Image (cartoon, helix red, strand yellow):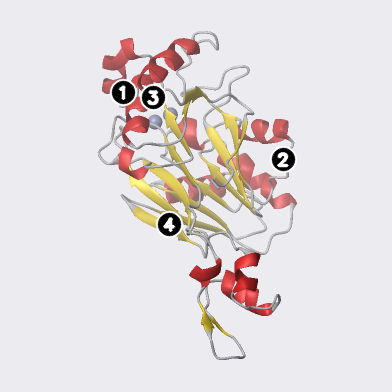
Amino acid sequence: MNLEVFVLGTGGMMPLPGRGLTSVLVRREGDLFLFDCGEGTQIGLRRLNLRWKKITSIFISHTHADHVTGLPGILMLSSQVDRGEPLYIYGPPKIREFVEAMRRTLDMYINYEIVVREVEGATTVVQAEDYVIRTHPLVHTKPCLAYSIEENMRPGVFFPEKAIDCGVPRGPLWSRLQSGESVKLPDGREVQPSQVMGNERKGRKFCFATDTVAAPGLSEFARGADLFICEGMFSDDLADTAAEKKHLTAGQAARIARDGAVKQMGLIHYSPRYSERELKKLLGEAREIFPESFLTRDLQHIGLPFEE
Ligand SMILES: [Zn+2]
Ligand SMILES: [Zn+2]
């Protein structure tokens, strides 16, 4: 099952030619999850040529303009396809007011249900059969949330030869063992899944955190993530500016990644003061602390394979 991340934009504050505002799309099976939606998010979707009009859910970190002003266009264009299911929008308080005011004042034609869920603090926002989406409170100039998608543990590898050795004939009994049930053979013996399968394997984890200082518990929240996308707005020499405006420097982001032992950390939400070339400085600072750091780039595609 694919878990793919598409970086739609990497900028903070304002979109630049060649650098859209911070927005990330995650595709898992038939679901599309959009994280933040600044002005111009549609351009990134369009340039990636994705079939995106059936976004499952939109997760908003906070209601600053550079994270939400792409919503009207996305909601409007989503009406071009038929959908039976509602579109869910999650975010901190004020997100409902923002969506309602925008629908009212823009007289938007929307042919599907929009369900807005306001979220505060650490909570589970989506509990699906095989994954969970959680929030963690960030520390910014207004309520702000980090999000994670975490898949359940997966059953271990099935060894057909072991099943045969145990006398289980190929067929429906194999599927029952694979789904974790013990089975009874005609001779009365019982075979446990553990006799024919390896250890349970980890699912995958994705984490997205932007617009914050080093928030308490954030490294724990990101722990072990296959991909941690984290704000690194400023270079470390602007740590005072970052603290004052409640943002992270690249080095601070790297410390969170290192402390949470994530597999890789992609910086995002770059200040418009840095040209693409100047971002190398931020990368250097992050890598000094956490070598598995990289700069996310607009239109980047990152696959997250299962760990075998
Ligand atoms: Zn921002
Ligand atoms: Zn902000």
Check disc 3 and report its element: helix, strand or loop.
loop
Check disc 2 and report its element: helix, strand or loop.
loop
Q: Residue at x 54, y 27 (%)?
A: 21
Q: Taking the image as drawn, is residue 69 in sight?
A: yes
Which corner quadrant of the figure contains ligand 1? top left
Q: Amino acid at mark 2?
A: Leu
Disc 4, disc 2: CB below 8 Å? no
- Nearer to us of marks 4 and 1 is 4
Q: Mark 2 or 3 closer to N-term?
A: 2
Query: Looking at the rendering, which quadrant does residue 285 occupy?
Result: top left
Check disc 1 and report its element: helix, strand or loop.
helix
In this figure, which residue is indicated by the disc labeled 4?
125
Which label belongs to residue 290? Answer: 3
In this figure, which residue is indicated by the disc labeled 2?
50
- Nearer to us of marks 1 and 3 is 3
Q: Mark 1 or 3 closer to N-term?
A: 1
Query: Looking at the rendering, which quadrant does residue 296 occupy?
Result: top right
The residues tagged by marks 3 and 4 sit, at their Cα atoms, a distance apart of 30 Å
- Nearer to us of marks 2 and 3 is 3
Check disc 4 and report its element: helix, strand or loop.
strand
Q: Mark 4 or 1 closer to N-term?
A: 4
Q: Amino acid at mark 4?
A: Val
In this figure, which residue is indicated by the disc labeled 1?
245
